[in-house]
Amino acid sequence: MLLKDDAEHPVPEEWRPKFRQIAYAFAQGDFELRAIPIVGVVPIDRTTAQHFAENVSTYGEGLDPLDDRTWEWSVYRWMDGYWQFAVDLTTQSVPVSDLTLHAKVYQDAGDYRVVVEGIYPE
């Protein structure tokens, strides 16, 4: 259950597999999230996906699947109409990097829709 208040909260256990799937796809180079569709996650258009790939390339390290330690820092909060998630990514040499996946989560008629907004160094 996602909370609708003004505080930052740790990413709930039930949401972690979804973000693991997204990070795994990115680690495999699938920045469009199309090779293996993820239920409830909106695929990313080619231009935006290229921008994500460039941000990772500029960072200087490839991505790896999420390390369990990422949940110690990853958070979400209610933003008046959606939840904003910030998930610290794992790179090839750092289990919790300062490269962060940003996503909005919307609730539509009981279903959730995840829109990945970016990958940014924090």
Image (spheres, rainbow, N blue to C red):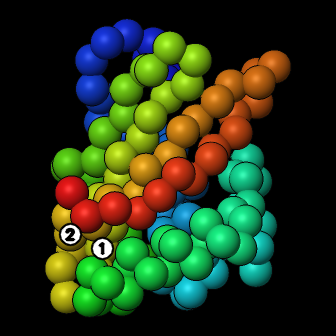
**Hey, which residue is sitting farthest top in the picture?**
5
Report whether 66 appears left or right of 17: left
Query: Which quadrant would residue 106 be assigned to in this image?
Result: top right
Q: Label 1: state its secondary structure.
A: strand
- Find residue 8 and report its horizontal and vertical position in percent: 27, 26
Instruction: Name which of mark 2 and mark 1 comes first in the sequence.
Output: 1
In the foreground, 24 or 62 = 62
Q: Locate residue 79, reporting x and y percent.
A: 45, 20
Q: Split into 4 quadrants, where in the image is the C terminus?
A: bottom left
Question: Left or right: where does residue 72 sit relative to residue 36?
Answer: left
Give the numbered dot on residue 2: none
Residue position marked by numbered label 1 in the rendering? 90
- Marks 2,1: beta carbons within 8 A: yes
Taking the image as shown, residue 45 lies to the left or right of residue 109, namely left
Query: Which residue is at the front of the view, 44 or 11?
Result: 44
Question: What's the amino acid at mark 2?
Answer: Ser
| Residue at the image position 56 percent from the left and 53 percent from the top | 116
Visible residue check, residue 26: no
| Front one among 52 and 109 | 52
The residue at 19%/88% (across/down) is 93
Residue at the disc numbered 2? 97
